[in-house]
Structures are given as structure tokens and as C-alpha cells.
Amino acid sequence: MEFTIDRNLLSKTLTNIVKIIPPKSTYTILQNIIIEAKDKKLHIQATDLDIFIKKVIPATVKDSGKVLIPGKKILEITKEANIDSITFKLKELKLQIEAGNAHFNIPSLDYQEFPEVPKFPNKKWFALGIEELRTMVESTMFMVARDMSRRPMNGILVQIKDGELRMVTTDGARLAKAVRQEAAPDGDLIVATKVFDLLDYNEGDGKIDVFIEERMMGMKYQDAAIIARLIEGPYPNYEAVIPATFTGTCTIEKDVLDGALKRVSLVASPHIKNVRFDFTEGGIQLSASSPDIGEAKEDVACVYEGEPVGLWFNAQFVLETLRHLTSDEVVFQLTSQSTAAVVLPKGVDNLMYLLMPLRIDSWEE
């Protein structure tokens, strides 16, 4: 095997590919990637056994061949090379790398030891623009549960229902839902977040085709393909916790609330960051206290319609939600001090957040 390839292209591709390599694994073969040179292209594969990824990029191929080599080490060499193109030659299970005046000999392994790649799912479900997918993922993924004992909530629910494609995440204390119109058949599956981390959202304006088959999902885009085992459900009934009616609605400038909340939360409990929101016709009063730090209050102007209500929120959760809103104003829809609040970007109807209030009875607590 012998080929020459653009260093920047290889570096970019490997940077994406090696994300799949497990940081620690007793199955050491997973630290390696397959590189196959043929037909003027490189076919690069990697897996963590739950997800398989393959990317194809152009190269000048002199002799075809296949090799199994340490993925992260090849990336390090590629990144540090100070030349535009790199040549790779496989001789007697040694991969010779020529990068200008630098020369490397890297031991390779038998590529037949690499795990067998599952058959790509054959039922196409829907197609989605790369930029649309990026927006939906970035708007929801930060609310995925980190507690590994709640396995279904460690993934993103991808659901088509009532003519909508929905992406939903929740950690039990908050929930995110992004939607777009989609005419594909109804269905739902739970996808590991790592699958979406592996997508290259800089691939242009193309579309990603999504395929399904029993417990597997496949994604094809440009010259790349991903096969992923799905997370077994069921996913929580998220629709049951979204209030159907509201007794109060608050519209406020996002940056004004963001600044005030950052200031007041400076004296909140370091552990739960509890800040009280008192919604009245005159605006919102933010307040917080902790025995060792002190107290703080700040009044913030807003447009409020409805009955006065006071709720405690985790300030960090609210601030993180605000960071993911693209609108200048944010809308809070409220019901009671013990019912979840719905948070919406004003003028945007395809994104919704839900925040559960903290159960704290009084300011002194």
C-alpha cells in the first residue's frame, strides 16, 4: 500500500474520526482505525462497538491496500507535520510515514482483527439538512441526563409524530424540545449523543439521510456513513409534564435577565444555586441568600400578565437555557410555584424549554 494525501484534509478527517475512540477500554483493538487505499480514495473506519463510522476522502493512491493503525497517534503525526502533503507506505506490517524531512515507522496490526461492521440499515426514514440538524442538536443536547443509571435519558429522543420531527432531551429537572415539519412515517428512537458529536456540521449545505432497522440507525451524508446501536427505551412520557394551561405570562429582555440573574446568584447556595423569581405586574424580583455568603435582591422590568406567582429555580439551569435562545426576548409561561415553567424564545415556534421549580418553602431556607 502506498498513497499521498493532503495533510490538512487528513488532519480534519482524523480529528473527527478519533472522537469515537474510547478513552479507556480493555479491548485495545478499539484504539485503532482502519485505513484502506483504493480507487483514488482513502476509506477510514473506526468504532467503539456501539457506533461505527466511515469517511471517504480523495488521495493519490499508488498501490492499494489496507492497514490497522493507532488512530490518535496518526492524528498527532499529521497535525505536527510541517508540509502540505504526507506519503504513507506499508511494508512488512510497518507503516512508513514521510512528512517532509520527518520520517516515521509505526507498527500496524492485522486489519482482520477489527470488529465486523454491521450491515447498514436499509429502510430510509427521513432526510434533514445538515444545518437544520445542527440547530436542533445544539438546542437540545445540553439537557441530556448525565446520570448513567437513567439510560434512556442519556440519549436524544428522535421522534416523528403528527407531521413533526421532534428532538427531545431531559434530565428530570428540565426538558428541551426542538421541532420542524416532517412528512415521514411516525416513529421514535433514542440516539446516543456521541452519534451527533461525530457529525461534521461544516460539510456544506447537503442533507443527511437517516435509515432505521430494528435496533440500529444509519446516517449517510456527503462521503461519510454512521451506523449506531440505539439506546433501549422506553423514553419518559415527556408530553405529560408539559402544562396545558397557564395562569401567567412574562416577556422580558434576555440580556437584562441574564445580567441580573448572574449578579443575584453570586450569593446563592454554591450547591443548588437557588434563586427565587417573584413574578408580578410590576416585574420580576430576583432574590437569593445563603448563611455563609449573604443576601441579594434585584428588580427587573418585564411585561407580565396574570396572577402573581413565586418560584425557585436553579440559576445555572436558567442561565444555560438563556444562552441557547437566539431571540432578544424570552417568554416564561407559568402555572404555579410547584408546576414546571415553560420557557420560549419570543417569536420562535419551533423550540421550547421546560424548567422544574425547586421545592424551597421560604426565603430564609
Image (tube, helix red, strand yellow):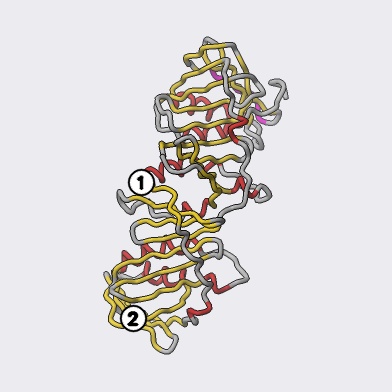
Q: Is residue 264 above or below residue 215?
A: above
Report the number of discs: 2
Q: Amino acid at mark 1?
A: Gly
- Give the residue drawn at x 56%, y 31%: 354
Q: Say which quarter of the image contains residue 29.
A: bottom right
> Quick one: 34 or 285, which is closer to the camera?
34
Bounds of the magenta segment? 293-299
Q: Secondary structure at mark 2?
A: loop
Disc 1 crowd, CA 10 A, few/some/many (<14, 14-19, 20+): some
Q: Is residue 302 magenta?
A: no
Disc 2 crowd, CA 10 A, few/some/many (<14, 14-19, 20+): some
User: What residue is pinned by disc 2?
Assistant: 64
Q: Say which quarter of the image contains residue 346.
A: top left
User: What residue is pinned by disc 1?
Assistant: 129
What separation in Å lies between label 1 and label 2 (alpha carbons)? 34 Å
Overall secondary structure of the magenta section: strand
Q: Is residue 68 above or below residue 223?
A: below
Q: Does 53 sit left or right of 41 as displayed?
A: right
> Quick one: 253 or 67, which is closer to the camera?
67
**Res 250 seen here:** yes
- N-term-proximal mark, 1 vs 2: 2
Quarter of the image with the N terminus is: bottom left
Judged from this view, the residue extending furthest toward the bottom is 92
Q: Is residue 182 above or below residue 5?
A: above
